[in-house]
Amino acid sequence: MRFIVKTPFFFLLFFVFSSSCKKEKIDTDCGCNGLTYLTIENLQARHSGNGYFVINKTDTNGSLTYGWACELDSTWEVSTDEKIWNYTISGNLRKRCPSSNGEYVLTVPGGLMQITSIKKND
């Protein structure tokens, strides 16, 4: 008799747990091909290596932002002094993609950057 009573309970429990899982929507409007959330034009920047740029936005709001170039160029020189802005840069900062392993992504300024113009400062 107990078996007959327990069986529906286990099926109900299984149904509740299996129906509570849902697949998260993948955000396709992010990364290098995603939406532009900030366009920068002719701002001073320094290349810190591996396509990572620190961008001086003092012309706009007095702060710094950061960007990782979508396409790397081996001729970019790394700035060894944080006071020297070795490039003038224009481009589109793209929306960041959520972490693939479910970790929380901090919403700090910066992200992937499609560079539309880059000039070496003398």
Image: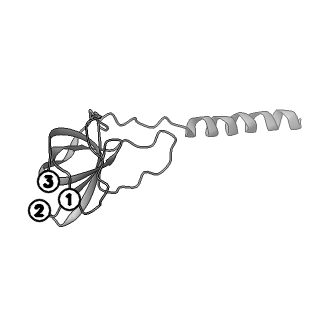
Residue drawn at (47%, 51%) of the image: 104
Residue drawn at (12%, 61%) of the image: 60
Tell me if 29 is positioned left or right of 103 in this view.
left
The residue lying furthest to the bottom in this view is 62
User: From mark 1 to mark 2, how far is it between C-alphas?
Assistant: 8 Å
SS at circle 3:
strand
Residue 82, placed above or below residue 72 = below
Please say which color scheme the image uses: one colour
Asked whether the beta carbons under mark 2 and mark 3 sit within 8 Å of each other, the answer is: yes
Nearest the camera: 51 or 63?
51
Q: Amino acid at mark 1?
A: Asn
- Residue 14, position as x, y percentages in the image: 68, 35
- Residue 38, position as x, y percentages in the image: 19, 49
Task: State which quadrant residue 117 falls in.
Answer: top left
Asked whether the beta carbons under mark 3 and mark 1 sit within 8 Å of each other, the answer is: yes
Quadrant placement of the N terminus: top right
Nearest the camera: 93 or 14?
93
Residue 108, placed above or below residue 118 = below
Residue drawn at (71%, 33%) of the image: 11
Nearest the camera: 64 or 37?
64
Disc on res. 56: 1
Asked whether the beta carbons under mark 1 and mark 2 sit within 8 Å of each other, the answer is: yes
Q: Earlier in the sequence, mark 3 or mark 1?
A: 3
Residue position for label 3 = 43
User: From mark 3 to mark 1, how far is it between C-alphas?
Assistant: 6 Å
Residue position for label 2 = 59
